[in-house]
Amino acid sequence: MYKYILKRLLFLIPTILGVTFIIYAVMNITPGDPGRAILGANAMQADVDAYNHMLGYDLPFLQKFVNYVQDLFLKGDFGISYFTKQPVFAEIWPRYGFSVRLALMGALLSAVIGIPLGIYAAVKQYSLWDTVPSVISFLIAAIPGFVVGMLLLYIFALKLNWLPSYGASSLRHYIMPMLALAIPPAAQNMRFTKSSMLESIRQDYVRTARAKGAPERTVIWKHALKNAMLPVVTQMGLTLGALIAGAVVVEKLFSLPGIGSLIVDRIPFKDEPVIIGGTILLSVCFAVIMLVVDVIYAFIDPRIKAKYVKMKGK
Amino acid sequence: MRSAKKAVQAVDSNRYRRSNRFGEIWRRFRKSKGALIGLILLLMIVVLLLCAELLIPYEAAIKQDVRSALAGPSAEHVFGCDTYGRDILARIVHGGRTSLSIALWATVCSCVVGSLLGAVAGYFGGIIDSVIMRALDLFMSVPDILFTMAVVFALSANFVNLLIALTISFFPNYVRLVRSQVLTLAEQDYVEAARAGGSNNARIICSHILPNAVGVIIINVTLNVARIIIYESTLGFLGLGMPAPHPEWGMMLSEAREVMRVAPHMIFFPAAAIVLCACSINLVGDGLRDALDPHLKS
């Protein structure tokens, strides 16, 4: 078991390096001109060149990448923003916590809404408890997340005037963004839980449990649900990962101070260091979440555990 | 000579069986009311978009008219006008043409690239498989929306670059899907038989393995078109879609956000267009899944 976790942990290192490389390479397809961007349009070309040389920006691509990685992982230095001329790290770090919190709360809310509905829909298949949520979840699957957010904005902020439409200063500010973030994955979780549960209900061990006379409640809760939840855990991890990045839309829509909105806001200004840094930070977070999901899965799925215990025995 | 004759016969019986199979699939597909409604809606949308130029000229979608700015629906402008007084109906129709063609092309590209890589990885296994799958793991470690944003940012937004960005984000799914299909199919006896009969690898992959994985691929292709439409509108909303003044659903909604209070029709119609389109495609996709793969049906 620990061997498995260690293996996955070690694999995180090449993953993070590889991800950094991919993002850095993509962003360098059209290399920017940091000297020009930082010194301004009126600076002398010689000064700009000297500045670029000082930053090491005139080096070949791989050399630049190695320098970037060294600065990034050894010194925590993401470079300097072209737009605000501040260190990038100071700009993205406070926002990072916000984005992660938002994604965590969104994922939690989507689980709280989606999973019980999915279980109930499977248990009461073909009843109203199944058809109504299923139809709604089908419709939501066809609505982009930002449209969900805009509809919420229109109804609750403009028409009913119940909730503030932007900012993040009080708890009430979080209600709409959280809902906008949670509703699309909640629909997905509902469908996923339902199909997983339906599959589990049809297994032989459930029939066995029924046949031996176990009460329906025990059958559902102890026999069916426990097994149905295994894939749902993975699904929840994927939701969280998707929300870390997917929050960019909601952050933008509700003008929230997260990394996603920072990246999008800086795109018109071609502020490469911030865009690269923010993207790398979010991707690393995503990779770590995937790792945690894998490890949790190994703990709760007896089959994976058994595989490693057997290997130990050999 | 005799073996050639036999081969011809085999092909003939194969063709017979195949036509039968399509009939069978259609019969099952037809049974689902949702799938039929989806198909009809989708056909209507496609016909409408194909004839768009005849119904409303493209100029109407970009012609600005300050006097009718933010005007609500009227006889002249059925869906009303936007901030610059452009006809929303025209913008939806012409935006839809771009959205749908990008979605289709991106689906085709990602499917072809992904399926080939997946087939190669699954069939050869070993080192080739490891290299492809590890590279894929890296690709999938970058959240796809960020990745698309990065690619569009780096290449600047236009039709071809959007296509590239969406293809890169969507092909990994096909690699995984096709690889797992191939892993099971490569064990089948008929593959063994083909190999014994002297078929080379390319032939086995193309004529024995991929055709048998095609059902699963088709289902995913259909559902992916809807996902890409949604995805693309999100990019447009974030300001990374087709460059202005070209109409684009996501961008229309992003413009509508600013004037939500006075012109709610600017949200309603483009949003309805996206939902209608994605919904009908999803209905067809679900219907196809049930028709092609009856044992998947719950």
Image (cartoon, coloured by chain):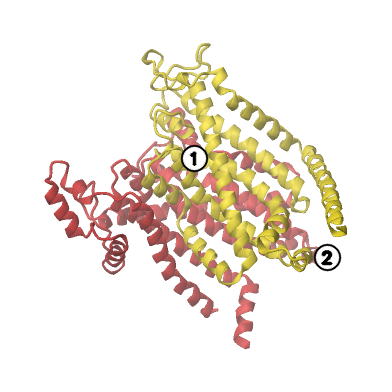
Chain colours: A red, B yellow
Cβ atoms at labels 2 and 1 below 8 Å apart = no
Q: Tell me: residue B4, above or below residue A182.
A: below
Judge from the rendering whether residue B14 lies leftward or rightward of residue A296; answer left or right. right
User: For mark 1, does the 10 Å Cα neighbourhood hold few (<14), some (14 to 19), or many (20 or more) residues?
Assistant: many
Side (left or right) of A107 relative to A124: left
Q: Which residue appears farthest toward the top when viewing the image?
A: B75
Q: Position of residue B21 (x, y in %)?
A: 81, 46
Q: Position of residue A270 (x, y in %)?
A: 29, 45
Using the image, tell me which numbered label, if any, was put on residue B232: 1
Amino acid residing under circle 1: Glu
Does B73 appear above or below B240? above
Quarter of the C terminus of chain A within the rendering: bottom right
To which chain does the residue with label 2 belong? A
The residue located at (84%, 44%) in the rendering is B20
Give the structural element (helix, strand or loop) at label 1: helix
Label 2: which residue? A213
Question: Quadrant of the image for the N terminus of chain A?
Answer: bottom right
Name the quadrant containing residue A204.
bottom right
Residue A117 visible in this rendered orientation of the protein: no
- The chain ID associated with circle 1 is B
Q: Who is closer to the viewer here, B223 or A130?
A: B223
Look at the picture and state if B275 lies above or below A83: above
A68 or A61: which is nearer to us? A61
**Which percent across, then down, holds residue A252?**
39, 42
Q: Amino acid at mark 2?
A: Gly
Q: Quadrant of residue A313?
A: bottom right
- SS of the residue at dot 2? loop
